[in-house]
Amino acid sequence: MQHIFHEKLLVVAGSIVLLVILIANITASQYIPTMFADIFRSDREPATLVAFIVRAKDLEMYRELASEVQDIAKENDEAIFQRDRALSAQINYYEQLSKAAPPSPQVLYTLYRLYKEKGQNTQAATYLERAQVLDPALKAE
């Protein structure tokens, strides 16, 4: 009988500890976006902010950041999205070249690399396959 009481006591105590940890975790997570905004405001190097947002902008959680962080991102929009815009411009250029007859395996392979760099792996694979049909020596990176 005493053994069952101790088991139940351990289960209740363990549940309470887990509940306290869960509440602390939820509470702390509410302050993280604001904390980042405070750090960025106090940072004298805008490059630090831009480098962080360039890496974070593709994450799903980026859309949920505090409005303060999003405001800072808007102020630095050109620097943050510079790489994306350059990749898009290169892709547009090579897409036009790829429509030439006959298509060049180098152009198709370049499109594969650009789409891969942009994170569009399905589109990249399509261009790699097309390039390899014309030049089987081309390999995936």
Image (cartoon, helix red, strand yellow):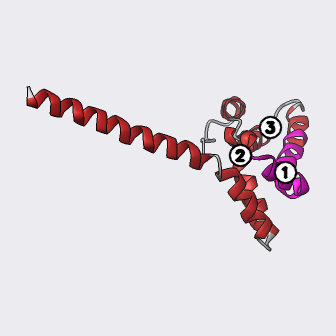
Answer with the quarter of the image where residue 27 lies.
Answer: top right
Q: Would you call the spot at circle 3 few (<14 residues within 10 Å), some (14-19), or many (20 or more)? A: some
Q: Residue at x 88, y 53 (%)?
A: 77
Tell whether 16 sits left or right of 78. Answer: left
Can you say whether 76 is above or below 121 in the image?
Answer: below
Tell whether 72 sits left or right of 106. Answer: right
Tell whether 103 sits left or right of 137. Answer: right
Q: Is residue 78 magenta?
A: yes
Q: Residue at x 88, y 30 (%)?
A: 101
- Chain-order first, disc 2 or disc 3: 3
* Residue indicated by mark 1: 81
Q: In whole angstroms, how far apart are the C-alphas of marks 3 and 1?
A: 30 Å
Tell whether 45 sits left or right of 21. Answer: right
Numbered mark located on residue 117 in the image: 2
Image: magenta residue range:
66-92
Numbered mark located on residue 121 in the image: none
Numbered mark located on residue 104 in the image: 3
Task: Please identify, in this view, whether the residue under mark 2 or under mark 3 is nearer the observer.
Answer: 2
